[in-house]
Amino acid sequence: MLKAVWSFFFLSAFAAALWQSAGGVLTVWNEMAAALFSSAKASFTIALNLTGVLCLWLGLLKIAEKSGITEMLARMLKPLFVRIMPGVPPDSPAIGSMVMNIAANVLGLDNAATPAGLKAMEQLQEVNPHKDRASDAQILFMVINSSAVTLIPMTILMYRSELGSSSPAAVFIPILLATSVSTLVGFLSVAWVQKLNVFNRVVLSWMLFLAGLVAAVAWAFLRLPIEARTEVSAAAGNFLLILIIVWFISWGLRKKIDVYEVFIEGAKEGFKIAVTIIPYLVAMLVAIAVFRASGMFGLLLDGLQNLFAFAKIDTEFIPALPTALMKPLSGSGARALMIETLQNYGADSFPGFVASVVQGSTETTFYVLAVYFGAVKISKTGAALPCALLADLAGIVAAIMLSYFFYTTHV
């Protein structure tokens, strides 16, 4: 699957550039070449910047592992994971690492989520009988990551505030609902492919619990004064971040382990992982950059605009489509397009509202896939990409539909 997608990006970009050249637009080749080299350099920079974060969080996760925190979490969630990941041993430390990753994603703590996720992928790889092919557990874990529910979209709220929105946090509830839809569709699509029984008492109980948690967060948020919502959301997320660190260290001291030496041991693993993922990042991000620079992205956007206009579908959301189409390809690109929409149309405009909700509805699928599978040298990803893209589509459609409802009620 990765081979086909990667080749498609380059071949379709070349075809689009030839088409433009035939029309006299020769500068496209310069733009593609510039994108090729700049994205290769940017890929290394991303991995370099990720190194410090990986060292920090893998050091802390090593403390959690040595002090028994991950084992405690694994025991607590064992009934759920033996049903949705039957190939993973019930006592595997991967369960604790996956819980850490999912919790960090839910809380909007991206810097903590990626190291925990990479650690989980390594631990899942240890019990994977086919080292070049993703196991069922790795596929499910990757899809959950690429569509993870985010309770506190701090970055989006802060961008809206900085760009002059009178109600930056108005997108909080639609983002929460859209990303919940994305995660549910991703989970159910993998469950269907892997023939998992998700309608048993344990799985249904957890799904109801998570739905209740989302509802509780939404209710608590709506109870806050409008002017305090962005500040409280950001403060809550950062408080939880520091609380987790203090919990790990305090628990390690309680268990009488040398937390400093254990942290250094884990941090060394972070450096190794950062080096490992560089070729995979370069491969994927270069292909995406060339695809975009060729004009293929613009052609796709124009085609969708014409399709919606022909079908007589309301096109007020169209200015937010670039963010939606870019989101699975590039996190930084989607963020830049969201900001551009907020600047051009206004932070409180409908296109700005839609772009903000879309930005928070899903993760950057191709980046997540390249980093997570690249870290364990997996080239055959099975159903991971189709299921993740289906989750992206569900999240984006939900984001647009929810924006129509919530923007109307908000204004």
Image: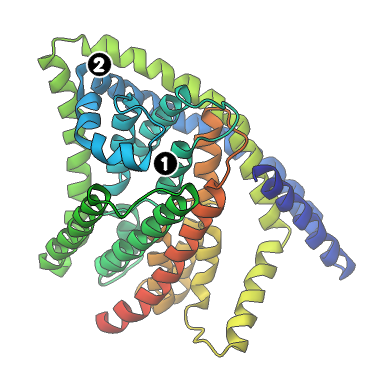
Mark 1: give few (<14), some (14-19) or many (20+) Cα within 10 Å: many
Q: What is the total number of numbered labels drawn onto the structure image?
A: 2
Quadrant in the rendering for residue 14: bottom right
- The kind of residue tagged 1 is Phe
Q: Position of residue 172 (x, y in %)?
A: 27, 64
Disc 2 on helix, strand or loop?
A: helix
Compared to 315, does 278 lie above or below? above
On the question of residue 168 being in view, the answer is: no
Sequence-wise first label, 1 or 2: 2
Left/right of residue 186 with respect to residue 13 in the rendered view: left
In front of the other: 34 or 102 = 102
Quadrant in the rendering for residue 96: top left
Residue 288 numbered tag: none
Quadrant in the rendering for residue 207: bottom left
In front of the other: 372 or 45 = 372
Q: Residue at x 49, y 65 (%)?
A: 340
In front of the other: 218 or 88 = 88
Q: Position of residue 394 (x, y in %)?
A: 45, 65
In front of the other: 134 or 2 = 134
Which circle, 1 or 2, is nearer the viewer? 1
Q: CA distance from mark 1 to mark 2?
A: 23 Å
Residue 66 numbered tag: 2
Q: Residue at x 29, y 77 (%)?
A: 406
Q: Position of residue 110 (x, y in %)?
A: 36, 42
Compared to 152, does 132 lie above or below? above
Compared to 153, does 399 lie above or below? below
Residue under numbered circle 1? 141
- The kind of residue tagged 2 is Lys
Can you say which quadrant of the picture contains the C terminus? bottom left
Q: Residue furthest bottom?
A: 312
